[in-house]
Image: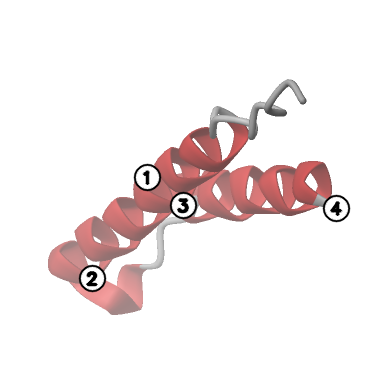
């Protein structure tokens, strides 16, 4: 389930980074790119998250 979430975040973030809409203006496009980069960084942090170690009993 985590893998599907990470892949969808990467795809959505990459889409936002690559998309340019003239109606948004320069500031709107910068904000959209920052949100896309944030999605990609969030996906990386989720994917690299530490797995819980089992305590030896």
Earlier residue among tags 1 and 4: 4
Residue at numbered disc 2: 28
Disc number lying in front (4 or 2): 4
Judge whether 1 appears above or below 46 on screen.
below
Q: CA distance from mark 1 to mark 2?
A: 14 Å
Q: Choose top left, top right, bottom left or bottom right for residue 25.
A: bottom left
* Label drawn at residue 37: 1
> Is disc 2 placed on a helix, strand or loop?
helix
Mark 4 vs mark 2, CA separation in Å:
32 Å
Separation (CA) of disc 1 from disc 4 = 22 Å
Foreground mark, 3 or 2, reads: 3
* Furthest-bottom residue in this view: 23
Mark number displayed over residue 1? 4
Mark nearer the viewer, 1 or 4: 4
Mark 1 or mark 2: which comes first in sequence? 2
Marks 4 and 2, the one that precedes in the sequence: 4
Quadrant for the C terminus in the image:
top right
Residue 39 disc label: 3
């Amino acid at each position: 389930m985590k893998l599907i979430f990470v892949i969808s975040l990467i795809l959505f973030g990459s889409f936002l980074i690559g998309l340019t809409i003239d109606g948004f203006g320069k500031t709107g496009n910068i904000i959209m790119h920052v949100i896309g980069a944030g999605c990609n960084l969030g996906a990386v942090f989720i994917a690299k998250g530490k797995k819980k170690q089992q305590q030896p009993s």
